[in-house]
Each structure stands twice: as structure tokens, then as C-alpha cells.
Amino acid sequence: MPTWSALVVGAHFFPMARSLRAPMLRWVGAAMLATIGLAALATLLPDATENVWQSVPGIGCAAVLWAGAAYTGLRAGRRRA
């Protein structure tokens, strides 16, 4: 379930980027979908368990979202100064 939720969350960044005129959100969406794709490929490994399908997107998408937030915060800080 968390992987499918991450898929929906990642996909919604594309229309949101257009409506908010924030192209950086396309990168966040693409990175989240790529993370899910990597998880799907990882499940093909011989010793892969269901934990791979759940933990890789969870940790990976969290890292992508934190990186996007950090980038936005740093960019906003530069505009103020």
C-alpha cells in the first residue's frame, strides 16, 4: 500500500508544477517515480522480499521530499538576502 500511495503522490506533482508555475516540482515528481521504479526492479532480485517493495519507496521518497524542501528553503533564503 505505501508504494501505491507514493506513486499517486509522485504523479500529482506534475499537474501541481504546471498550476503553480514551479518547474522544480517536476523534478520532485520524477525523482519519486524513479524511486518507485527502482523498487520495482529491486523486487526482481533473487533474494528480494516484500520489505524491498515497501521500504525502498518509503525511504527514497522521504529523502526526495526532504531534498525538495531543503532546496526550496535555501532558494527562498537567497532571495531574501
Image: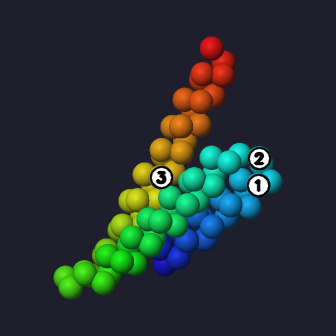
Amino acid carrying label 2: it is: Arg
CA–CA distance in space, label 2 to label 1: 5 Å
Determine which of the numbered discs, if any, sits on residue 21 in the image: 2
Residue matched to label 1: 18
Please say which color scheme the image uses. rainbow
Which residue sits at x=56%, y=54%?
Answer: 28
* Left or right relative to 79: residue 66: left
| Residue neighbourhood size for the residue with mark 3, other residues' Cα within 10 Å, grouped as few (<14), some (14–19), many (≥20) | some
- Which of the two labelled residues, at mark 3 and mark 1, occupies the earlier sequence position? 1
Callout 3: SS: helix
Q: Is 65 left, or right, of 78 in this rendering?
A: left
Q: Quadrant of residue 8?
A: bottom right
How far, Cα to Cα, is label 3 from label 1? 19 Å
Residue 53 shows up from this direction:
no
Q: Are marks 2 and 1 in contact (CB under 8 Å)?
A: yes
Cα distance in 3D space between marks 3 and 2: 20 Å
Return the x and y of residue 51 as percentages of the image width and height. Answer: 31, 76
Q: Residue 64, labelled with which disc?
A: 3
Q: Which secondary structure lies at badge 2?
A: loop
In this view, the residue in front, 4 or 35, is: 35
- Whichever of callouts 3 and 2 sits on the residue coming sooner in the sequence is 2
Q: Residue at x 35, y 68 (%)?
A: 55
Relative to 1, does residue 67 appear above or below in the rendering? above
